[in-house]
Image: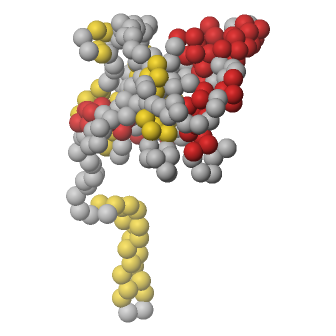
Amino acid sequence: MAGPGEATISLFFFDISVDVDKKFGSEEKATLDPIDPWPPLRAALKDPRNWTAVPATGTLSVVTLALPPGITATVIDPSGKMTWKESVAPLDRTLTRFGNSTTPAPVKFSVDQVIVGVDPAEYSAVSDFFAAAQFEELTDAEKLSRASFERMQAGVEVASASVRAGPSISAPLTYETEYRDPEHGPVLAPLFTVPLWMQQGLLASGASRQAGIIAAGTRAYAAPAQLAQCGRAVRRRLDPGPLHQGRGDGADHQGRGPAGIEGVRRRAPGRA
């Protein structure tokens, strides 16, 4: 204890007062041990929750990526980006404090290089909000004048400069058709291989034509007249023609040709 005061002694009918300024006890200032920010920052670097996949700018994902059960890795589209962002301490900034304690010495953490596989990758800084007073010594005036939270570097975003497509693999697109007939049991039709012209027609006029991916890349600038012409050509080739002119006697029961299809339709109860 320390500080000025007054000491008073009372003797019978009078008091004696004396001014005193005295310190009692030892003077000790409570301090916290310095803390090294590197161990928690390294843990944040290895934490999969701090890694996220970001779609590439101007592109739409055409597939859904998934991992086997029990795997917690981050799945990244080959044309997308990956982002690492942490909230432990700001990067590329000299730190003299860490939370309520000081650092053993002024220290700065920076990302100098990112390696993907065996090749260096391009990256850019990602920012987030940090409280400056938690990471550097500030005067009372600076604490009052500066914002409570400021944008500082919190990680990096990694993206490839180009996407290299692998070799193409050709494979026939086939369908297996089975007709359900309660009276005669299931009837399996021969495998049907979708010809190229039909695949092109479905791409030009089917559900995929209405998807958002159609507005990306060079297809966004395709002339509407060309797409309409392609759709008309497909409709002409898909015209069933004499489909309902079959005999309907079920003689061609394997679904080969219009007569077989009509026969199956008539033999199945409750069907048109």
Q: Which residue is drawn at 36% across and 88% down?
A: 11
Please determine whether, in this image, residue 21 is positioned above or below residue 220.
Answer: below
Q: Which residue occupies the extreme right position in the image? A: 225
Pick whichever, 178 or 47, lies toward us. 178
- Looking at the image, residue 251 sits to the left or right of residue 108; the answer is right
Point out residue 47 in the picture as x, y percentages from the top left corner: 30, 37
Pick whichever, 148 or 85, lies toward us. 85
Q: Quadrant of the N terminus?
A: bottom left
Q: Can residue 176 be seen in this view?
A: yes
Q: In which quarter of the image is the C terminus?
A: top right
Please determine whether, in this image, residue 4 is positioned above or below residue 244.
Answer: below
Please determine whether, in this image, residue 219 is positioned above or below residue 29.
Answer: above
Point out residue 70 in the picture as x, y percentages from the top left corner: 26, 43
Pick whichever, 68 or 39, lies toward us. 68
Q: Residue at x 70, y 11 (%)?
A: 233
Residue 190 occupies which quadrant of the picture?
A: top left
- Looking at the image, residue 242 sits to the left or right of residue 52; the answer is right
Point out residue 186 in the picture as x, y percentages from the top left corner: 44, 43
- Looking at the image, residue 56 sits to the left or right of residue 34; the answer is right
Pick whichever, 139 or 233, lies toward us. 233
Q: Which residue is drawn at 66% across and 27% down?
A: 243
